[in-house]
Amino acid sequence: MSTASVRLESVGSRYIPTPPDSVSAQPYSVGSRLPPSSKPDPELVAPHLSGYSSFSALIATDPDLQIYRRFNKLSARNILYLQSEILEAERRLEEFDEVDMKDSLGPGGLDVMLSTRCWEAFARKAKAGNERERERMELIKQIRELVKEYQDAIVRQSHLLSLENPAPRVRKAVTRWFAHIEPLTGYGRDLFADAKDLVALRTAPDQDRLSLFLQDHLGYLFRETRTHLSSSWGSMYYFPEVLISRIVSMVSVLLAAMLLLGAIVGLYFVRDQGARLGMIAAFTTAFAASIGLLTSARRAEVYASTAAYAAVLVVFISANIGGNNQVQLVKIVSGTT
């Protein structure tokens, strides 16, 4: 089995596998949360034996790499099997009740009624060797176990479905590394065959579109080398997300200032009212587009911020018009032209 050398760039990182010989590979990325000052883990310094050892060591380097199969189809099938078993047991218990109903009308009806109304009497008869009550007791215990297993499966499946899918960058990083390195053989090599059946134990918080763009396409410009990871994985590059966050904050502040100050300066020098209305519409549209495209703001937040921005421009124009009218009135009163 050939083993590809891998160049991994991470933390909002880019993982770029370099296959052997002349095979080319496309870059891909994954978010990482390891701070640049984190101390190396001694267990991750030494090379790992290819297989479960190397694979587990890789995904242990960062919480975002903890992605596994959901096995949704098998989970659903297991729940369906449990439902059918419970339905069968329920029907058998109803058959016991139907027989009791008929026997309660016969000569031994009082004894039958006692077993149906008193647990102690029923348990005593089952322990004493009454065949029918013993079978019913075994059925009740079976139902108890089946219902417990079924409810546990339902709760676990509900919790599993509440977990999010891995981010595309993380999924591509792990699955492509897995495909190139091939750490597992046998049925294990099909671990990530179904990309839709994956679950992430931890996902990154919602990020704005500008941050995601910088991480996906420009993260390698801010990479830093970490030499404490296993050499068998190739070179690994990280870039700290805090740096991306700072860049995005600076761009956002500058863009907001440009849109506001640019609109105010432009409206100050333009006197034509039609042109002013056109400028307000253009700047407001640009502001709304910047909020919608470059941030993770929700629709209501975009509406509120756009309305506030437009209100500022309208107030500025109103104050400016009022000031001009007062100047003109002073000129008329003083007799000047």
Image (tube, rainbow, N blue to C red):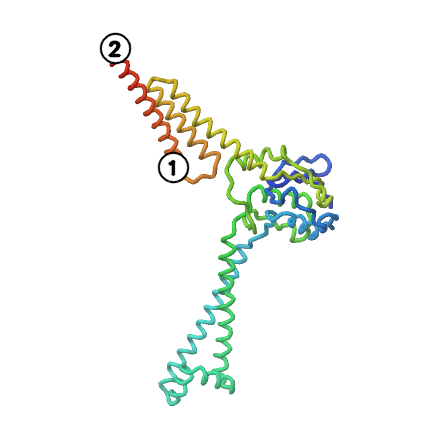
In the displayed structure image, the side of residue 235 where residue 327 appears, left or right: left
Give the residue number, with chain letter if any, for mark 2: 335
Q: Choose mark 2 or mark 1, whichever is in front.
A: 2
Residue drawn 66% across the image and 51% down it: 56
Residue 211, position in %: x, y?
54, 36
Asked whether, in this view, residue 276 is left or right of residue 68, the answer is: left
Q: Residues within 10 Å of mark 1 (few under 14, many from 20)?
A: few
Residue situated in front as seen by the camera: 191 or 158: 158
Give 189 or 303, whichever is nearer the viewer. Answer: 303
**Residue 112 in picture, x, y percent from top left:** 41, 85
Give the quadrant of residue 215.
top right
Q: Is residue 337 left or right of residue 313?
A: left
User: Label 2 neighbourhood size at 10 Å, few (<14), some (14-19), many (20+)?
Assistant: few
Q: Is residue 198 visible?
A: no
What percent of the width, then of the height, locates residue 280? 37, 25
Q: Nearer the viewer, residue 247 or 2?
A: 247
- Toward the front, the furthest residue is 334
Residue drawn where x is 60% and y is 35% of the image: 219
The residue beneath circle 1 is 304
Q: Residue at x 48, y 83 (%)?
A: 123
* Residue 101 percent across, percent down from the top left: 37, 81
Q: Nearer the viewer, residue 24 or 57?
A: 57
